[in-house]
Amino acid sequence: MTSEGWGTPPVEPISQHYIVCGGNALAHRLVLELVEHYEVPVVVLVADRTRDHAPQIEQLPGVAAVVEYPSVTEEALRAVSIGTARGLALVEGSDQENIHAALGAQEHNPDIRIVFRMFNQRLGENIQRLLKNGAALSGSATAAPAFAAAALGRPNAVEVDGRYLHIAFDDAITSDRICVVADQIDRQDLSKIRLLPVQEGDSAQFVRLAREFGDDGPVLPGGVHREPVVPAAEPAEAPGGRAALQALPVEPREPISWARRLRWRVLDTMRFFTSARMRLVLLTALAAVLMAFGVLWYLNRDFGWTVYISLLDLAGAAQPDQQADIAAGTGTGGIWQRVAQVVITICGITFAPVATAIAVEVLGSGRRGLPRNPSAGTRDHVIVVGLGNVGTRVATQLHDLGVPVVCMERDPQARGIAAVRALGIPVVLGDGPFEEQLRRARLKHSRAVVAVSGDDATNLEAALEARHGNPEVRVVVRLFDDNFAGHFYKTLDNAASRSVSYLAAPAFAAALMGSEVRGTLSVFRHVLLIAELAVEDGSGLIGLNRHDLEDPGGVRVIAVRFARSTHLQWNFPDRTRQLTPGDRIVVAATRSGLARLNTVLVEEG
């Protein structure tokens, strides 16, 4: 591939290749997936071969060509031989640019498989219907559940047919686990982790019984025992921690009691009372109202009537006693009751303007579009640093779970500010030092800090400042570099690292090959994919059984839906039954394992 100027086409004609448009981190990981695991020819279209990850992409072995164009135009698509390509991945640019490029590519090649990144998932679903063979994915939506779950210190879940699959570690593993997904887990050396290690089959116990009572076994018919034979030593259990795939009937949610929610609401309202003098006046008035209420209740012995008359007095709607009523004996009765009502009415005059001012402030700040600062009552919250696509998704998901969230952003024009403001999430804006910003975000009272900006150094700086300001806080950091992440795990406890591109790239690659990835699960820095594959006419999966799918490694068949069935059968025990057209299988797979299955689909399907 020559490098002179923009738009230089490949030197040699190319066909049956895959095109990746973009030079960002996701494009880099996606190209790696395609050339290393799927072993397909890849042509990369970048805006500038000297910026972002374009130089690293150009050095990857297996990349057929890198073409430079400022945007994905008709000319650019022709330069990368769109007419003879098998697939196109659009992983950079705005939603509008990706939609335009996808529709243009379909005009040149109606049969091409198109996968495009969309932040607006609803719009992406509608555009997907316009394409003959297309899929809209969101990298941030794929990765956000892993970040949110890591912030709460629990595994994220993937929903499959009403069950929520999640990863459990060590002592949390139960007897009804679906399968072991990792062993040899060592936090000091994550490279030792084995994903989907070899394990006993479902029928291992029956095989042992058959050997024991069979012709060559120690037990003969009638219960006669042969001479015991020393069995071969079983392999020792792998050292280190283990992880297993388990299912829950309901989605795991953060348990937050109504008392804690009420406490947050009450403390949150204190942000309106920043003046010590105002607090003193209001607390005095409140104490006077409570004392007057107690007097009324004591005199009348009727709690309901006391509440009723007190509320009327607070609103200034009480009817005073007239002299004629007192003389006739029809008044409310007693000087102490009249004194109590006067006190409540005067205090009501104090409360009314304060309530009005609060209402005006709330409505006015919303109309001005100003994000509000965290209040003095913010407690047990998660601080999200960076309101890009990923940060916005993480903050939204945590808010939906009922977890208090405070966001930090240096760019006042960031697209996520408006989204979190609409949810009432406090935002700390400014370009000051992280120490000051985190203090304003009430780091001392937070439970976790999630740093998800687009720069590794910025995220690490935020995490270290957070740990310095609050040694007990949990930190979750977005890091692209694996070596960087390894040192991070070795250095910090109560910490987690995730890579958006590492989580999203396998899903984009599988979608490019025609598979449906239901979600990704994290085992530290490793990714486990939950995918559903359809066995169609002409598919390479026809005639294969569980042995054929699992024995090469990297794949576990966790559920099967047969052609004439409406429900999934979990851990289907018959490992010899062959797949037929109309069947669907759900697998837990490593990146290379799913690539192997997709290669079968592409090459033989």
Image (cartoon, grey):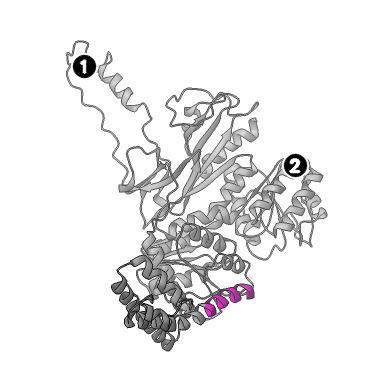
Q: Which residue is mark 1?
A: 219
Q: Amino acid at mark 2?
A: Ser
In the image, what residue type sits under mark 1? Val
Q: Quadrant of residue 494?
A: bottom left
Quarter-of-image position of residue 598: top right
The x and y percentages for residue 223 are: 18, 14
Q: For the stretch drawn in magenta, what is the main secondary structure?
A: helix
| Residue density around tag 1, few if under 14, some if 14–19, many if 20 or more, within 10 Å | some
Q: Pick whichever, 448 or 324, lies toward us.
A: 324
Q: Which residues are magenta?
A: 356-371
Q: Is residue 346 left or right of residue 81?
A: left
Dot placed on the residue nearer the N-terminal end, 2 or 1:
2
Residue 347 in view of the camera: no
Image coords of residue 408 (percent x, y): 52, 72
- What is the number of the mark on residue 184? none
Please say whether residue 51 is visible from this viewpoint. yes
Q: Residue at x 37, y 73 (%)?
A: 470
Circle 1 — which element? loop
Q: Residue furthest top?
A: 222
Q: Residues within 10 Å of mark 2 (few under 14, many from 20)?
A: some
- Which residue is outermost to the front? 328
Quarter of the figure that contains the N terminus: bottom right
Q: Which residue is mark 2?
A: 15
> Residue at the location (65% across, 56% down)?
120
Q: Position of residue 471 (x, y in %)?
A: 35, 71
Q: Is residue 233 magenta?
A: no
